[in-house]
Image (spheres, grey):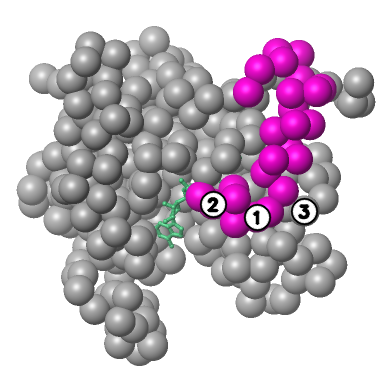
């Protein structure tokens, strides 16, 4: 049987989630995606209207099929956790069953089980503020959307991930080295995500025989990265200073994710894998 993957955090064809979906599809996996509720309508209508057809092309010439797009807001674990202002928010009105618990239940009903879980989402409402200026609420929101969201996804999906399965999240070097501009507690959120990768690798490995790894990716001009505001500078910095002087493509991260999700990586868990043209290994700019 082919493998089945659920990729949380795909809302267009520019980000790492889309590229990971493509690599897994090219390797023969069935693809399910979780799309942030406020971005769902535009993503689904763009898919339907063929706007992504060019970027759906796989190496064999066929087009990636997405078996199902699930609305998801990974900040909410179950319906009881959803506050009134979100329930009545127009951007959430058309969708239902989008909390983490409900999405996992629906995937179980509709597909039974999965083999691969990918977390490719982050959000920090105060990302443009220095950590020193970040509010408590902004900090906690960054951790909730970018770190706890992985714990929640893993907890709710683990029972339907087949033994031998793999989970992958995306992190950034700002967790361990100071990157001015990556503020609002996002650096803290990535540090938590990396630490949690180790602890959850132990817990989910023992309990469910599944692997937990994270990819520390170099800079990519995604929608989320453009919102932070310094992405072009980071890409230029990397081209100037990384061991490999080429722009990083989302496909390179997609390929690394396909490797980590495959039996080729069956003894790899609890790791941070750098896919960044080697920039993390430099101590000074050149
Ligand atoms: P992206 O915009 O393609 O992906 C982020 C996704 O998160 C979006 O689809 C957004 O709708 C979704 N999202 C936000 N809040 C959500 C929520 N509460 N529930 C569900 N979905 C939600 O951008 P990307 O840069 O590809 O980001 C993917 C991952 O890669 C993130 O974890 C990001 O931190 C990480 N990363 C990105 C870079 C980079 O330079 N772009 C570098 C290293 C790591």
Q: Name the residue under label 3.
A: 181
Please name the residue shown 35% across and 89% down the image.
84
Contact, CB < 8 Å: mark 1 with mark 3? Answer: yes
Please name the residue shown 64% across and 40% down the image.
172
C-alpha distance separating marks 2 and 3: 14 Å
- Residue 111 appears in view: yes
Q: Position of residue 119 (x, y in %)?
A: 42, 44
Q: Does residue 276 sit above or below 121 in this rendering?
A: above
Q: Name the residue under label 1.
A: 228
| Crowd rating for badge 3 (residues with CA inside 10 Å; few <14, some 14–19, many 20+) | some
Q: Name the residue under label 2.
A: 224
* Image quadrant in which the N terminus is located: top left
* Image quadrant in which the C terminus is located: top right
Q: Where is residue 156 in the image (x, y as percent from the top left)?
A: 30, 53
- 222 or 118: nearer the viewer: 222
The secondary element bearing badge 3 is classed as loop
Task: Tell me, yes or no, whether the highlighted magenta stretch contains residue 49.
Answer: no
Please name the residue shown 76% across and 66% down the image.
129
Nearer-N-terminus badge (1/3): 3
**Quarter of the image where one finds residue 220:** top right
> Could you tell me what secondary structure mostly forms the magenta stretch?
helix
Label 3 beta carbon less than 8 Å to ligand 1: no
Instruction: Look at the image and give the residue range highlighted in magenta.
Output: 223-247
Label 2 beta carbon less than 8 Å to ligand 1: yes
C-alpha distance separating marks 1 and 3: 8 Å
Please name the residue shown 20% across and 41% down the image.
50
Nearer-N-terminus badge (2/3): 3
The secondary element bearing badge 1 is classed as helix
Task: Tell me, yes or no, whether the highlighted magenta stretch contains residue 229.
Answer: yes
The secondary element bearing badge 2 is classed as helix
C-alpha distance separating marks 1 and 2: 7 Å
- Residue 167 appears in view: no
């Amino acid at each position: 049987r082919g493998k089945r993957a659920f990729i949380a955090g795909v809302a267009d064809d520019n980000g790492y989630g889309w590229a990971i979906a493509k690599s897994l599809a090219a390797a023969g996996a069935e693809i399910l995606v979780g799309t942030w509720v406020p971005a769902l309508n535009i993503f689904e209508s763009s898919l339907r209207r063929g706007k992504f057809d060019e970027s759906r092309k796989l190496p064999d010439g066929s087009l990636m099929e997405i078996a199902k797009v699930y609305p998801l807001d990974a900040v909410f674990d179950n319906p009881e956790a959803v506050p009134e202002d979100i329930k009545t928010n127009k951007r959430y009105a058309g969708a239902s069953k989008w909390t983490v618990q409900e999405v996992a239940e629906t995937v179980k009903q509709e597909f039974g089980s999965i083999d691969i879980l990918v977390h490719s989402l982050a959000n920090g409402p105060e990302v443009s503020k220095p950590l020193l200026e970040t509010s408590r609420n902004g900090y906690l929101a960054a951790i909730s959307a970018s770190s706890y969201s992985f714990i929640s996804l893993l907890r709710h999906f683990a029972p339907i991930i087949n033994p031998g399965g793999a989970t992958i999240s995306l992190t950034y070097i700002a967790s361990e080295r100071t990157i001015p501009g990556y503020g609002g507690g996002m650096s803290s959120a990535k540090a938590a995500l990396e630490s949690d990768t180790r602890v959850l690798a132990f817990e989910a490995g023992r309990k469910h025989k599944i692997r937990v790894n994270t990819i520390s990716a170099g800079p990519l001009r995604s929608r989320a990265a453009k919102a932070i505001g310094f992405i072009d500078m980071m890409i230029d910095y990397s081209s100037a200073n990384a061991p490999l002087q080429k722009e990083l493509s989302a496909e390179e991260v997609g390929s690394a994710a396909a490797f980590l999700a495959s039996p080729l990586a069956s003894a790899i868990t609890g790791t941070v894998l750098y896919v960044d043209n080697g920039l993390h290994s430099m101590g000074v700019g050149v």
